[in-house]
Amino acid sequence: MDGNEAEKAEKGAESPRPRKKQPSHGVLLFWTFVVGIVTFAAGVALLIWMETPIFAIPLVVSVPVIVAVAFRNMWD
């Protein structure tokens, strides 16, 4: 490598990786809430429509939390 290529390689090694574009905290909080509520509504609708046994109720309550956290962590 000549001098110019070595300088370019050094600059590339020193420059940090570009940050991912993130939505603002308020927007992220709003969409996390919406995703959780929509998932909860879908679970309740399935409980009513399919006449699911009583042991499925804890799943309907816990799955929206898991989905909302997974949605929020997409930007971390």
Image: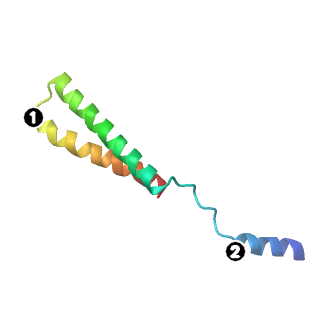
**Residue holding disc 1:** 54
Q: Is the residue marked by circle 1 packed among few (<14), some (14-19), or many (20+) residues within 10 Å? A: few
Amino acid type of the residue tagged 2 in the rendering: Glu
Q: Tag 2's secondary structure?
A: helix
Give coordinates of residue 62: x percent, y percent.
23, 46
Dot 2 or dot 1: first in sequence order is: 2
Give coordinates of residue 31: x percent, y percent.
41, 45
- Which one is nearer the viewer's eye here, 8 or 57? 57
Q: Tag 1's secondary structure?
A: helix
Residue drawn at (20%, 22%) of the image: 49
Give coordinates of residue 13: x percent, y percent.
70, 72
Residue drawn at (63%, 65%) of the image: 17
Residue drawn at (30%, 48%) of the image: 66
Q: So how many labels did they put on this image? A: 2
**Residue holding disc 2:** 14
Residue drawn at (57%, 57%) of the image: 20
